Image (spheres, rainbow, N blue to C red):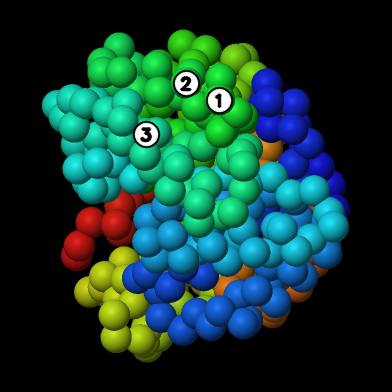
Amino acid sequence: MNYRTLGKTHLQVSQLGYGAWGIGKHMWEGADDDESMRALRRAIDGGVNFIDTALAYGDGHSEQLVGSAVKASDRPVYVASKIPPKNYEWPARPGVHASEAYPAEWVVECTERSLANLGLETIDVQQFHVWSDEWLSQGDWAEAVDKLRHEGKIRFFGVSINDHQPANGLALVRSGLVDSVQVIYNVFDQSPEDELFPAVLEHNVGVIVRVPFDEGSLTGKVTPTTEFPEGDWRNSYFGGDRRQQVWDRVQAVAGDLGVPVGGLAEVALRYTLSHPAVSTVIPGMRSLRNVEANLSAEASGHLSSSELDVLRRHRWLRNFYQAP
């Protein structure tokens, strides 16, 4: 396992992290707690030392599993969690005041709930689960973050930038108030490279990359006939003709690279790890099979400059999080 510095935190985090949304079971069908624990343990044994969870993932269920795995391990593991907005609006809407989403008492309350779920004394990186740069000079959230740090309940502060809005975090990055940002970055959504990545490199802010596989399309396993279980949120994400759209795009990527569609997952993960601004990538890993595949891809190293040039031609910015 290779390790990178998470910005100015100086934490040495595994470049392959663990995304723990799916194991919380909320909005995902098919997660099994026993398999989730096996996956967590295997990831940690394989050198993964950074796990990203959230209070909203199964109303704390993901945090409970993560805490159990971390406490049972004899290896040091850094835990990041996230505070949901008090108004429970994802993403943050323009014009909404910071006091509606992150009043100080809510920031403190949710952090204490997360600590109880995790069974830990400190959260290494506590994040806001949504963000708007309008909030930079609004409300009392910053005082709450300082209070939690002073009390030792959190070590560092970050935000999860709204889906497909990497520029909606630039002001925060430049302010010096944030230690890390979490952002969507993959073969299709390359937009963080435009402004966000240069800014984080300049200001030494860590980058946590989510959705490296575009919610599964870049694994090559989403075909025009793919069916997801009832109640699985991907029925909306890949609704309408979107399965056909991603299948056509994925075939084009594989064809240009000269690799089988089944080999795209490794390419997709290695693509995200090839940018110097990226500190860690957190794919969801609900099974041992997922963990083994991602550990293998991480060990394969960066893509070549010629491969990156090919992939840059496949930028495809759209928002499937909005219903079709």
Q: Position of residue 37 (x, y in %)?
A: 65, 74
* The image quarter in which residue 200 lies: top right
Say whether marks 1 and 2 touch (CB < 8 Å): yes
Between the residue at mark 2 and the residue at mark 3, the CA separation in whole angstroms equals: 10 Å
Looking at the rendered image, the disc whose residue lies closer to the viewer, 1 or 3, is 1
- Image check: 301 left or right of 174? right
Question: What residue is rendered at 23% in x and 48% in y?
Answer: 88
Please give left or right for residue 155 compared with residue 194 in the image: right
Residue bearing mark 1: 151
Horizontal relation, residue 221 to residue 274: left or right:
left
Residue type highlighted by circle 1: Glu
Asked whether residue 256 appears in the rendered view, the answer is: no
Position of residue 66 relative to residue 200, above or below, is below
Provide residue 154's location: percent of width, then percent of height.
Answer: 57, 32
The structure residue drawn at horizontal position 56% and vertical position 20%, both measured from the top left corner, is 150
Q: Which residue is mark 3?
A: 107
Q: Position of residue 215 (x, y in %)?
A: 46, 64
Give the residue type that dot 3 points to. Val
**Numbered disc 3: secondary structure:** helix
Helix, strand or loop at mark 2? helix
Residue placed at 19% from the left, 36% from the top?
93
Q: Which mark is residue 147?
A: 2
Residue kind at label 2, given as amino acid type: Lys
Query: Which of 1/114 is in front?
Result: 114
Q: Residues within 10 Å of mark 2 (few under 14, many from 20)?
A: some
**Badge 2 or badge 3: first in the primary sequence:** 3
